[in-house]
Image: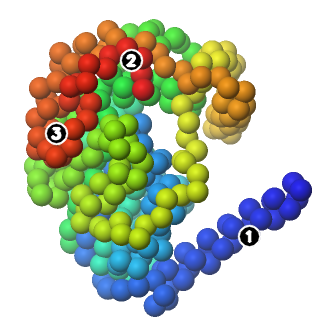
Amino acid sequence: MTILSRWNELGLEKAKDVQSFLLRRTFLGGPTGSLDTLMLHIGGPKTATSTLQHWLAENRWNLRKSGVDLRVPSDIRGRNFIGSALRYINGKDDTPDTSGFDRLFGGVSTERLLISEESLTNSFIPGASRNRNGFDCIDKLISFLQEVKVPKIKILLTVRRQDQFIASCYGHRLQRSGEKNSFSDWKKDNVDFKNLSWLGVVNKLDVAFGEENVAVVPYELIQTEGDRAFYERCLSSLNISAKGHVEPESRARNPSLTDKTEQIARIVNTFPTTSPEERSRRTALIERINKFAYRSGDRTFRPYISDDAKICQLHYKVENTELAARKFPDLCTSFSFNDGNGGRAN
């Protein structure tokens, strides 16, 4: 049965490769034209980016038939498309080199191209030695994108309330960055609560690309209305119809850590690693443990963040309310701290 299952997986992968070829290279893909508009979902990280990308990939054909080509991380990573962008954003290069990024446009035969890649803002996540709070990387990203040679750029930014964002970032650091400290110690060492302004990020994007070309969608929409509503809102904010789009058979596989996995991950991360390969194996091990823990009924790790919520509300309630009024006034979510939720992380 294992062999048959693997053959089925290989057959599905091959079918998707053939579908991708047909979409990009033949009339079956729908209307064609010269690239006019780059629609770029830049993250932020920990804002349901995997969920959005999962839905996008499932509806690649529907998007293409509407005249929208698509690039998601599976099309991008490991192929030297964004390496130079990340080196510049992270301060390793002094000047932007867009040659790799420009190659993402190769083979595009539509007027619109949608790229979703949150690696461009992964430095928002606190804990990287290069940048204490991370949000400042938006300046470098803007400078880089202004060098990209495309007629029009529209930006999609997905956001999350700051206290919940921080809690999710800790899980990310445990799983992927070798974090050993407890949540409280990690916050003390890495998080600057005075510098987590989504409004500040959006203001800079508005100035650079025009307010009409910057869309913002809150993660909290998933909590109130579900994955489909979040997906459809992201597309509609870019003037893309989701009519006829289908729901993926399974949810995106990027679950939060469980209680016991959080404890085990901190122990696993104490073992030294000396190469990227070893670090990848460590991450894969934590992911396998987490899957086993979920199947065994272990509950999701939800750190107590009541104090964090109070601090973030003090700093960002007014800002978040202003951002919501500007960019998604028709939505009623907890992004603006209006729900009184301030106990455990969601």
Q: Nearer the viewer, residue 280 or 174?
A: 174
Which secondary structure lies at badge 2?
helix
Which secondary structure lies at badge 1?
helix
Q: Quadrant location of residue 284?
A: top right
Q: CA distance from mark 2 to mark 3?
A: 27 Å
Q: Badge 3 local density, few (<14 within 10 Å), some, or many (20+)?
A: many
Q: CA distance from mark 1 to mark 3?
A: 45 Å
Instruction: Indicate the amino acid at tag 3.
Output: Ala
Sequence-wise, the earlier of marks 2 and 3 is: 2
Specify whether residue 130 is in view. no
Q: What is the number of the mark on residue 324?
A: 3
Pointer 2 residue: 190
| Vertical comparison of 144 with 260: above or below | below
* Residue name at image x 17 percent, y 24 percent: 317
Q: Residue 14: x, y in percent?
A: 69, 72
Instruction: Indicate the amino acid at tag 2.
Output: Asn
* Residue name at image x 29 percent, y 41 percent: 218
Q: Residue 57: x, y in percent?
A: 50, 62
Judged left or right of residue 108, residue 141 is left
Sequence-wise, the earlier of marks 1 and 3 is: 1
Q: Quadrant location of residue 259?
A: top right
Instruction: Indicate the amino acid at tag 1.
Output: Gly
Q: Are marks 2 and 3 in contact (CB under 8 Å)?
A: no
Judged left or right of residue 10, residue 56 is left
* Residue name at image x 31 percent, y 73 percent: 112
Pointer 1 residue: 11
Q: Residue 49: x, y in percent?
A: 42, 46
